[in-house]
Image: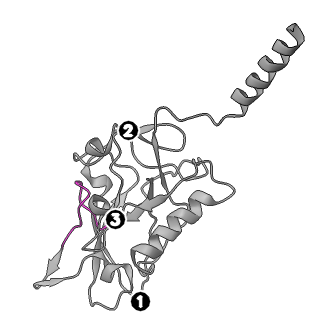
Amino acid sequence: MNKLLTMIFSAALIAACAAPVSNERNEKTVFITKSSFPSDMGGLAGADAKCQAEADDPASIVPAGTYLPWLSDGTNSPDTRFTKSSHPYVLPDGTKIAENYTDLTDGSILHAINVDATGALVLGSQHFWTGTMTDGKADHQFVANVKRNSCNAWNGTTVYLAIATIGVTNKKTGEWTNYRQGSCNSLARPKRRLTCFQQ
């Protein structure tokens, strides 16, 4: 009888150890891409694929899941596309950048977004495409009454003097997403990074 009880206990213990460990904190991971990209990324779908590729790379340390860029195309934005988490947003090394989505979009963050998906620190002042204001909504810039923001919805740079809002990796104020306007000029083809958020 004792032997039977021992076997039952052992089987239960093995089953418990094999069960997946749940993430009770439900944190959402955020990273800056290692690569930089020209503005013509194939729209938001193309930018989505770039974030997902770095998250899924074998060198990545971020949790598995869906990752979307903090990016707006003039119509869609993090405000319309993101799952607005009530849990903290953290860098791959565990550093908290916001308590929840409301905190993320209140005009400042707790820590600069300066770690890539491999856990490497991104030094200095690195720019990334956003097209997005501090509240997570699309920025709409007009020049001579013509909308020129979001680099032609990230589908190319054919619009003369096209611009886009860019963010920067060393800021915690609203400048983290709304640092300045950057050119999308097709001749210079400036390349900038993306910030990617787990959904």
Alpha carbon separation for disc pair 2 and 1: 42 Å
In the image: residue 73, left or right of residue 59: left
Question: Are there few (<14), some (14-19), or many (20+) residues within 10 Å of tag 2?
Answer: some
Residue 51 part of the magenta-drawn span: no
- The residue tagged 3 is 130
Residue 159 lies, with reference to residue 94, above or below; the image says below
Residue 191 visible within the image: no
The residue shown at (22%, 45%) is 106
Q: Nearer the viewer, residue 97 or 21?
A: 21
The image quadrant of residue 21 is: top right
Q: Amino acid at mark 3?
A: Thr
Main SS of residues in magenta: loop
Residue where numbered disc 2 is placed: 87
Q: Amino acid at mark 2?
A: His
- The span picked out in magenta is 130-140
The local secondary structure at tag 2 comes to: loop
The CA span between labels 1 and 3 is: 21 Å
Instruction: Find the residue positioned furthest to the top.
Output: 2
Residue 137: image location, x then y, percent? 23, 61
Location of the N terminus (image quadrant): top right
Residue at image point 25% right, 76% down: 149
